[in-house]
Image (cartoon, grey):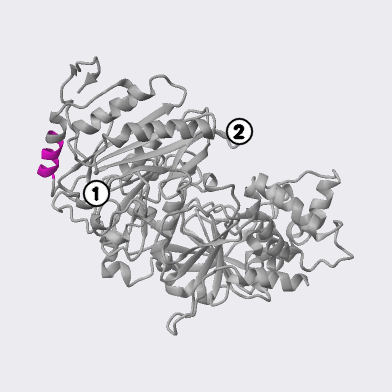
Amino acid sequence: IVITIIIAISSMISRPRRNLPEKQQYRVVVLIPFVGQGPESIPPYFPLFCASAAGSARLVDFLIIHNGAFEQYYYDLPSNVFLINLESTEAMVEHYLLRVVDNVGPDEFALESRETLVRVLTTYLELHPYLLVEFKPALGHIFLDFLDGYSHWAYSDLDIAFGDIPHWMDDGDELINYDIVTYGFGDSDRAYLRGQWTVHRNDATIINQLWRSCEYLSRLDDRFAKVLAGEEKIHFESAEACYSVQVLLENREQVRTKIAVKAFTDVHRDDSAYTHGMYLATGAKGSFSILYKQDNEGGSNLDLPNVDPFWFEKSSYQMQPLQVAYGPITQVSWRKDPTANCMYWVREIYRSKLCIKGVTSGQTMVMTRSQELTKQAHKVQNIPPGIASAPFFHFQEWKRSYRHSQMVAIGDSRHQGGGTWILIEEGIIPLPTKPTQHHTATVTPLGMKSMNAWHALDRSNFPPHPYCLVSGKRSSPPLVAECRWVVSWRATADVQIISSAPGWKNVYETEEVTLALTLQLDSSSTTLENTMHVALMNIKAWRKQPCVLVIFLRADDADEAKAVTKVIHNLLYQEIHDKCLVALIIGTTQDIVSRRALLNMAMDVAPTRWVVTGIELERGLVLSKEASFFCQRRAEIHKKASGQAFILPQFAIQKHENEVSSY
């Protein structure tokens, strides 16, 4: 009966099916389970993950298997990134994760029932989602249902920007000649399988079962029985410890393994990524992604922003493997010192087992079925002088300061012919095109081919970005902010459209300028009508050019919110023209709502290339009558410019006849 239920539920889940073409014998699927509590738990860098993953679509698919956390994720996904919704954490545990104990018979099971383990593990995962990384070695068995049509499966993480993975896999040599391949960062005093990128041959009998001897997984029932009995506390089990021992030591006669040094990381603050940034480019056609940075050795005189942005599309790069081995193959010596501590982050019993000696960061290690671990030097070729490249960049430190829309929200730039982005510690920004190139966008700023298609009731016309209105600091890890309230233009429950701007269908995207305004109101405030009056004065001064007004209303309850909303409707009814979009967000929170997030919302929905911001309505600031004409004239002058912004001087300061500041 249990098996029947599992099959029935699994069959209802939408998942990719790959019928590989005759010429594509190999294809990799990356399995990433995710547990979160709503859209607030979606990492702000997930759009970056997707945009970079898209560049490897010719070889790699990415499956994000989640508990419903991504239900309100509105970005368009690349063709090789799939969100698999299991609808609840309990469903993920019951129908998938519990497959790790499928060899434990009823008489051996340490808990009173499997339902008990489902309940306990569900609770722990929702409190500590990071525990999911413990299951990485067994993902090929757990999610066997999703492996049809794939020659290989892999595990990875979301805090990663990917480059040209297919080109780094030695033209398929790694998929042909090895059972397991992992990419490291040059920490050459230890041999282990990295949690950020480890690829397995899809072999349900041997390779996908190598984790079985790791009892923290295969006897998950016994582990939690001891926790519930108070005999021990739940402790984190790194997938890089026990599993690496099983593959590299206990089962080495069955497995061909390669440990290559290819990846970038942000753990060293003296790295050029900190001083010059990490570049992510998608090429002229946006057909693939590549990561590069200034080489730490020999790149100090390189003017990286002015390097040909499409250097990697030349035949010299495309036709040859990027990393090649050379020189003699020699044996690697295991330290075999029980006091060694080369893997400080794993449990004590494993800290000395994987320590090695005599290997440098310029050498690749290979474990063949001869049961010997060997090393050989490697070199990178076909990369321009002064540039370093890699298949991926793990930003485990930078993610602590990455925020929703902190700089720009990266989307899939391929519909506009590719582009180059610079990833830095605080976020990601676009690299401006060269001055000789004109602004030749083929779509409107809202992503439509023409504003004639504009209709505010169709929320797909709005930006997909999430906006974090309220955030706070986590207690652990320190210095990491967490978002506590996310809204989106596309979520009708979040944002009410009060004025739908039907006149946007006739907007000239490159010649007109949008005025972006934000306003925060308190339903109990006696100045509500006066503040709304200031907003309307600015809209009137803008002389029927496009405008956006995003209002946040703080109300104590639904009845109060309804009454104040009616007041706002009445104030706007006679004053708002048909080129002004007005949106209302209602909340009961007493926390500070981010003005920057509201401003980002207003700017992102602007229908024109140029946007004017910075008018603080709460201070009573009102634009002069000349401001609209001046901005429109500057937009006309810069119509064909390649830049992204220009600075306007302060227009003038004067006193309004009603004692309202004007500029």
Front in this rendered view, residue 413 or 503: 503
Front in this rendered view, residue 506 or 571: 571
Q: Residue at x 49, y 68 (%)?
A: 328
Count of marks placed on residues: 2
Residue 475 is marked as: 2
Front in this rendered view, residue 371 or 636: 636
| Position in image of residue 545 (x %, y %) | 19, 40
What span is colored magenta in the figure? Answer: 630-638
Which marked residue is nearer to the observer: mark 2 or mark 1? 1
Q: Is residue 614 above or below residue 371?
A: above
Q: Residues within 10 Å of mark 2 (few under 14, many from 20)?
A: few
Query: Residue 379 lies in what quarter of the image?
Result: bottom left
| Position in image of residue 624 (x %, y %) | 17, 26
Q: Label 2's element? A: loop
- Point out the image quarter for the N terminus: bottom right
Which label's residue is closer to the chain start, 2 or 1?
Answer: 2
Q: Is residue 362 above or below residue 268?
A: below
354 part of magenta stretch: no
- For the residues bearing labels 2 and 1, Cβ distance under 8 angstroms: no
| Position in image of residue 262 (x %, y %) | 46, 59
Q: Label 1's element? A: helix
| Position in image of residue 204 (x %, y %) | 65, 75
Q: Residue at x 53, y 35 (%)?
A: 558
Give the overall secondary structure of the magenta segment: helix
Residue on which disc 1 sits:
504
Residue 640 is marked as: none
Q: Amino acid at mark 2?
A: Ser
Q: Is residue 352 above or below residue 513?
A: below
